[in-house]
Image (cartoon, rainbow, N blue to C red):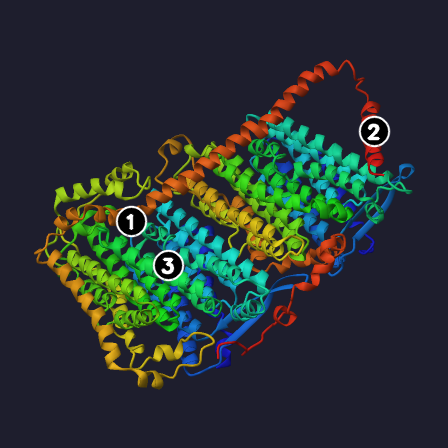
Amino acid sequence: MNLATFPWLTTVILFPLVASAAIPLIPDPDGKGRPIRWYALTIGLINFVMLVYGFYTQYDISSAEMQLVERYDWIPQIGLQWSVGADGLSMSLILLTGFITTLAILASWPVTFKPRLFYFLILAMYGGQIAVFAVQDLLVFFLAWELELLPVYLLLSIWGGYKRQYAATKFILYTAGSSLFILVAALAMAFFGDVVTFDMRSLMAKDYPLTFQLLVYAAFLIAYAVKLPIVPLHTWLPDAHGEATAPVHMLLAGILLKMGGYAMIRMNVEMLPDAHAKFAPALIILGVVNIIYAALTSFAQRNLKRKIAYSSISHMGFVLIGIACFTDLGMSGAVLQMVSHGLIGASLFFLVGATYDRTHTLILEEMGGVGQQMPKIFAMFTACSMASLALPGMSGFVAELMVFVGFATSDAYSFSFRLIVVCLAAIGVILTPIYLLSMLREIFYGNENKELTSHEALIDAEPREVFIIACLLIPIIGIGLYPKIMTQVYDVKTSQLIARIRTSVPSLVQTTATVPVDQTVLAPTAMQAPELKLS
Amino acid sequence: MESLYQYAWLIPVLPLAGAMILGLGLISFNQATNTLRRPSATFIVSMLGGAMALSFAILWSQVQGHEPYLVTFEWAAAGNFHLNMGYTIDHLTSMMLVVVTTVAFLVMVYTDGYMAHDPGYVRFYAYLSLFSFSMLGLVMSPNLVQIYIFWELVGMCSYLLVGFWFDRKPAAAAAQKAFVTNRVGDFGLLLGILGLFWATNSFEFDIIGIRLQELIASGALSATLVSIFAILVFLGPVAKSAQFPLHVWLPDAMEGPTPISALIHAATMVAAGVFLIARMFPVFADIPTVMTVIAWTGALTALLGASIAMTQNDIKKGLAYSTISQLGYMVMAMGIGAYSAGLFHLMTHAYFKAMLFLGSGSVIHGMEDVVGHDPALAQDMRLMGGLRKYMPATAITFLIGCLAISGIPPFAGFWSKDEILGAAFEANPALWFIGWATAGITAFYMFRMYFSTFEGEFRGNQQELRTQIKQLSLPAFGPGAMDPHELEAHDSHEHGHHASEPHESPITMTLPLMVLAVPSLAIGLLGTPFANYFEGFVYAPGEPVPDIAEIAAEFEWSEFLPMAGSSIGIALIGITLASLMYISRKIDAGAIASQIRPLYEFSLNKWYLDDFYDRVFVRGCRRLARQVLEVDYNVVDGVVNFTGFVAVISGEGLKYFENGRAQFYALIVFFAVLGFVILSV
């Protein structure tokens, strides 16, 4: 078989879906699902390996174009095509999806209730998630987006906590309701002009008038604001996250939130640049509100899962600011923040789940002093919290720094606006450690908790759990130490994107020349030995 | 020689490798690693020993006149933005490397004795090694971003180490307070870095300095704005070096084990702020407003620290406030442009204060035999006294430290402090006066500490005094920090008999004390005004190389003697007062305290700053967060739930109108799309 023509993306989308159909055939003698989970894990691993192999052999990171493109007519009568492809933006998130979903399967070990259905849904999600990031046809995108909701709804409503029905219903109402806007906007774009098409590239090439752009932009924005989420459309998230089990949690925080950010860059920014130029200041303000508002609510939360859920919302604020700052660095930071939060959020939610498995409570007042019995979980929790509060040397710091520098040096906004926004966003830098460290203090520090140890066996982390966290921490620290390993995947793409949208911002055309950039200073100066100032 | 510089990256990497190996061992083979106590410690100490040897070699080569050295590689890039990382070695770095590695090495040796019975012995070494890595990386950083990275890392290590005994609630609170207070400073530092980058497009110290001057000269940038950026950057050192008003975390950080207090909270990390000011000197030096702010912050902090230290009864807290005060001197020196003097004081202070802290640790170690493992009792000076008989080595080294910090010649502190005071006198006599008065207070409280600890009668066996102190100590721990039940819990854990007399600490603890006594005694001689070798080596960037002989030729006894005489004089007054109060008891300290009750209370309550912060910031932040959450729950989510409720009600009514077929929904969507297109065309 020719590697270059092998349909890598279609395969990685369909393989888990097909494989999940075989789950009912697997014998499960004791009803606890041991063979099924091994099966699911194997499928997940094979898919991830295929994904990485395809990326490694077929993907050229120095190109900003769509790669691994496949096109098949699906329903030619309405111009529907199965077309998939990946550029830097898609590729990094597809890789993240494969990684997190495989780990989530490994994290599902404690699930023993209806294992067949559970793993079926997880594998179905696997394919569906990749499809969202890979499809290049707006209608198929909408279908994939909708199909994605179904497994999540079931996973929430069957395996959730006490209020699972409420949370699941709220989730489905919110997201399904908002995705109608995607359909409306997609149809409007498709029928605009002479050619009816859903192909994203052709849609991008169309020349829309500004009013139309603004309307479509707003429709997309509402849909993606629910997903990302943006305050005030966020209230489904704490409920959904508060009730989900750990593996579902990892998928929700690790991947589903990123769909909002991805789609916003793909559609709002790439297809509707003129409208983006108009909307960008609003995005910045929403981003700042996200950061501060969610950090404060997180601080006041007494429920561990909801606390972390709000911290996710807070971190997504940086994505918004990054998207809207019209600089390479900011956009690059936004993508990195998505990848980084995917890893960090997944690890924190996994640890919350692991802690809950032992303490069987999520209320902070009932915990405390469990550090002595569970030193390994304590250590891992500390490490992941540090990653979340953007400790340098970990990925979150790099992403936030890139957004900060990108925005501070952006020439699209007035100086005072930038000053205020940067100051406010930096308040988040103070608030994040406040809620994360007091959370750690309340869970782990203090004397042995007699009330809890009397009826719960607090066993320390098992090797499987250490392994999962290690898998997540390695890329977190890797990116933190040397961000280029991640940024190079999508760097060309974001630069191209910024170059494209900058032409639509009228104020930028004149002012770009005024910023003096001394290339001799900023250029890479590798190993320039005895050369320094003092003398 | 060149290869020495090419491998200089090993200096931070060696301790990092040690920390990582131990950390991996603790996570994967916890029990096995915890039984290998001595081997682990030896491994970590030898890794740091290697780094120390390299540091000395580099210092030697720099003293010989080797060129500064810089290595960078591209770390992050996006579009035309490139950010490099790497390491730089110049005179300042090489001096800092030696200071950090020597103190860290001795502290690690000391730790073996101090933490001998602690179950977290191996973990402690791993943290210590991680801290050494971060601190060494900090001093080798070539640009602001890298400094910021390591700046945060040392903060994290401090957090981990202050909260080392995580079964103690006050330790957890102190660790969090330290981290969050430092984050407030980092907030400023980050904004300052961003502002300076925006203005100059560079993260490198001297390039920023040059470009800023150009921009101000050409009028492209207002001087006010530049001052704001620079002051924001200065907020970083304010938090890290415990300057007013962000000093409140340092005394609480004494909850950590004593070796940490010596290494992080006296000798190295807290000095990082002064180091950053030194690095930013090319930027700060040309902005007079900023220099004034720095100088006065330093002076105020020096006075504040000393005035609070006078009334502390906890030996470690007393030393902590003394550290705050001494850091104030350094910052003040930087602010008046006395670059070399400030760094010289940094170096001498690192040695004598590390020794004092380790000495206090030795005292606590001895006291614990008598009063048990209770920090409230073991650290209280009212229960000590007469310890010189039992712990002679500790007593002598502590006395040397006291003499050094009080500024008695020829001990180290005299030369560095006198240089600062001399410079302050030339810059602004008011600053000099504050520094001079503080020197007197310093001598007083240090000898109050020495006399009540080592002289007189041993008071540790007086049971009523113990119970009294225990009860008194409860509120003194600060708002909400200490839960009274915890003391009871501690009591119930105590077992075995206590000795009636304290004992001298083991050799691993006294040896580092004796080694540190040497620089505390003699290192000041490097910077005497007649032969200032230190200034010949570490001098402000951009200034001509000072010629030692020239400085020595300019030296005049008639200038030196009044300055030195006045500072020795006030120090002697302080010492005499302390001896009258705490040895011969000719003056009753209690009577004086009751006569100036308001002042005494003001000092005892740390100028009421902790209460103020607690009331305004801590509780204010909590209240705000709770209100936001209520809004989120009742208003934002309430609207959603209400809409859902309305939808259910109206859905009941509407269901007679709709036919529930897909066509109907399709029709709605169709009209919506049509509306879009029509509206926009």
Q: Would you say residue A27 is visible in this rendering?
A: no
Q: Amino acid at mark 3?
A: Thr
User: Could you say which disc has been placed on residue B671 in the image?
Assistant: 2
Displayed quadrant of residue B438: bottom left
CB atoms of marks 1 and 3 within 8 Å:
no
Q: Secondary structure at mark 1?
A: helix
Q: Residue B662 in the image: state x and y as whole percent.
A: 82, 24
Say few, some or many: other residues with alpha carbon within 10 Å of mark 2 (under 14 / 14 to 19 / 20 or more).
few
Q: Secondary structure at mark 3?
A: helix
User: Could you say which disc has been placed on residue B27 in the image?
Assistant: none
- Nearer to the camera, B353 or A269: A269
User: Could you say which disc has been placed on residue B297 in the image?
Assistant: 3
Q: Quadrant of the C terminus of chain B?
A: top right
Residue that protrudes farthest toward the front in the picture: B219
User: Could you say which disc has been placed on residue B606 in the image?
Assistant: 1
Give how far apart the Cα atoms at labels 1 and 2 are: 71 Å
Q: Residue B586 in the image: state x and y as whole percent.
A: 7, 56
Q: Amino acid at mark 1?
A: Lys
Q: Residue A321 in the image: state x and y as whole percent.
A: 63, 48
Do the residues at discs 1 and 3 belong to one chain?
Answer: yes
Do the residues at discs 2 and 3 belong to one chain?
Answer: yes
Give how far apart the Cα atoms at labels 2 and 3 are: 68 Å
Q: Does label 2 or label 3 sit earlier along the sequence?
A: 3
Q: Secondary structure at mark 2?
A: helix
Q: Does label 1 or label 2 sit earlier along the sequence?
A: 1
CB atoms of marks 2 and 3 within 8 Å:
no
Say few, some or many: other residues with alpha carbon within 10 Å of mark 3 (under 14 / 14 to 19 / 20 or more).
many
Q: Residue B360 in the image: state x and y as whole percent.
A: 24, 58
Give how far apart the Cα atoms at labels 1 and 3 are: 17 Å
